Image (spheres, helix red, strand yellow):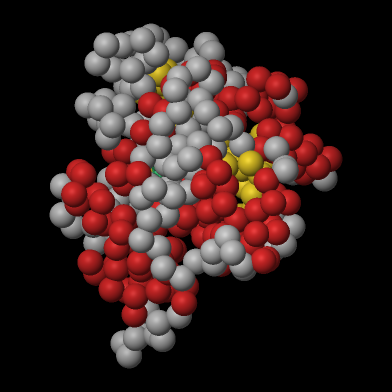
């Protein structure tokens, strides 16, 4: 299985990305780092610990505490979509009052995201394997890591990020939330000499957690229905809350899109995705367009597919489509 690291801001769909990272075939989770984003940073960190606990992750998989704010811009959070603590409406998760969870929050809270990523990558490289990084929140931790440890870029297999859109946004006409939270960090990542894949809104909006899939999650897919386990109940309440905020905020009637888990699905099952390589940059100064991922679809810049994946050429694969049924089958 390929070693992976997950940087995230849980967050409802991040919670499902963590589930997949812990349990999907073909990937082996080395650790998690958390970031500001969907909720205040102390909440995203505590949520990651609570989720690792609920998913029975191996005890040596830790949640490292990361950036509390973007590189230059003011910090934001998104209670409208994720509730005040980032996991609004979720029933059945262990609380911070549980001693085992409390202890893990305290211990893991002292681990730094950047140093955790560096250590995991170094150890893995010494054992002959490069690490793939999935990121499902603002990319502040990754930008800091790349800036402080440029020598470790060659030990990264690839970076897969959920963020951006090709001509569309969700927090302005053209800006997606993760990129908008820290556009400078996203540009630093896009310029780094590592293979990258972007999972844009255009693809995540294909993966709607509709009522049929909600039913399969709640009851199981066997004809008689599976017993409603605590995990199924927890995930069902998570999806119900996410569905209700997507309905009230974005008028998604059929169900919420499942953005973040697609990064892990991509690392576990790249065969179910179609991608195309482009030059991608982030708009940093636009009056109407700050945070837009500017994708050179027609290769106007006349760039080549070099081995560097950095500042001078086509720097990023952009997912075009996913086999939606295969993705939900994998999840279920
Ligand atoms: C992204 O923003 C957050 O709300 C989600 O967790 C996802 O990472 C979608 O734009
Ligand atoms: Ca997220």
Is residue 291 something one can see in this rendering? yes
Left or right: where does residue 143 sit relative to residue 79?
right
- Identify the residue at image location x=36%, y=61%: 89
Q: Residue at the spot x=40%, y=82% of the render?
A: 228
| Residue 249, image x, y percentages | 21, 44
Viewer-side residue, 229 vs 146: 229
Viewer-closest of 295 and 168: 168
Seen as rendered, the residue at the extreme right is 126
Q: Is residue 37 above or below residue 102?
A: above
Query: Whole-percent x and y of residue 287?
Result: 27, 11
Residue at 40 percent of width and 63 percent of height:
90
101 lies above or below 206: below
- Image quadrant of ligand 1 equals top left
Residue furthest out toward the bottom:
224
User: Would you identify the image quadrant in which residue 132 lies?
Assistant: top right
Residue 38 vertical placement versus 168 (above, below): below
Identity of the residue drawn at 32% across and 90% down:
224
Compared with 221, 93 (above or below) is above
Residue 326 visible in the current orientation: no
Side of 95 where 234 appears, left or right:
left
Q: Quadrant of the N terminus?
A: bottom right
User: Dividing the picture into quarters, in which one does residue 284 lie?
Assistant: top left
């Amino acid at each position: 299985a390929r070693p992976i690291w997950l940087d995230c801001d849980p967050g409802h769909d991040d919670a499902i990305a963590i589930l997949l990272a812990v349990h999907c075939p073909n990937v082996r989770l080395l650790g998690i780092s958390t970031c500001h984003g969907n909720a205040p940073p102390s909440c995203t960190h505590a949520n990651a610990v609570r989720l690792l606990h609920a998913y029975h992750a191996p005890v040596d998989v830790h949640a490292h505490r990361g950036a509390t704010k973007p590189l230059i811009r003011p910090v934001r959070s998104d209670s409208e979509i994720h509730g005040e603590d980032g996991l609004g409406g979720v029933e059945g998760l262990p609380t911070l009052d549980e001693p085992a969870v409390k202890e893990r929050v305290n211990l893991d809270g002292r681990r730094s995201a950047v140093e955790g990523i560096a250590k995991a990558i170094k150890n893995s490289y010494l054992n002959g394997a490069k690490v793939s990084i999935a990121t499902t929140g603002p990319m502040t931790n990754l930008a800091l890591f790349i800036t402080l440890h440029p020598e470790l870029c060659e030990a990264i297999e690839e970076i897969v990020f959920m963020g951006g859109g090709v001509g569309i946004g969700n927090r302005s006409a053209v800006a997606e939330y993760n990129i908008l939270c820290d556009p400078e960090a996203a540009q630093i990542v896009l310029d780094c000499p590592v293979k990258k894949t972007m999972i844009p809104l255009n693809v995540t909006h294909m993966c709607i957690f509709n009522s049929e899939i909600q039913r399969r999650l709640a009851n199981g897919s066997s004809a008689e229905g599976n017993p409603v386990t605590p995990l199924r109940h927890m995930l069902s309440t998570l999806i119900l809350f996410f569905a209700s905020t997507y309905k009230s905020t974005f008028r998604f009637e059929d169900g919420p899109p499942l953005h973040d888990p697609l990064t892990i699905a991509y690392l576990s099952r790249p065969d179910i995705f179609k991608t195309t390589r482009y030059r991608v940059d982030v708009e940093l100064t636009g009056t109407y367009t700050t945070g837009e991922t500017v994708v050179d679809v027609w290769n106007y810049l006349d760039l080549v597919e070099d081995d560097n994946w950095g500042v001078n050429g086509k720097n990023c694969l952009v997912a075009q489509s996913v086999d939606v049924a295969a993705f939900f089958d994998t999840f279920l």
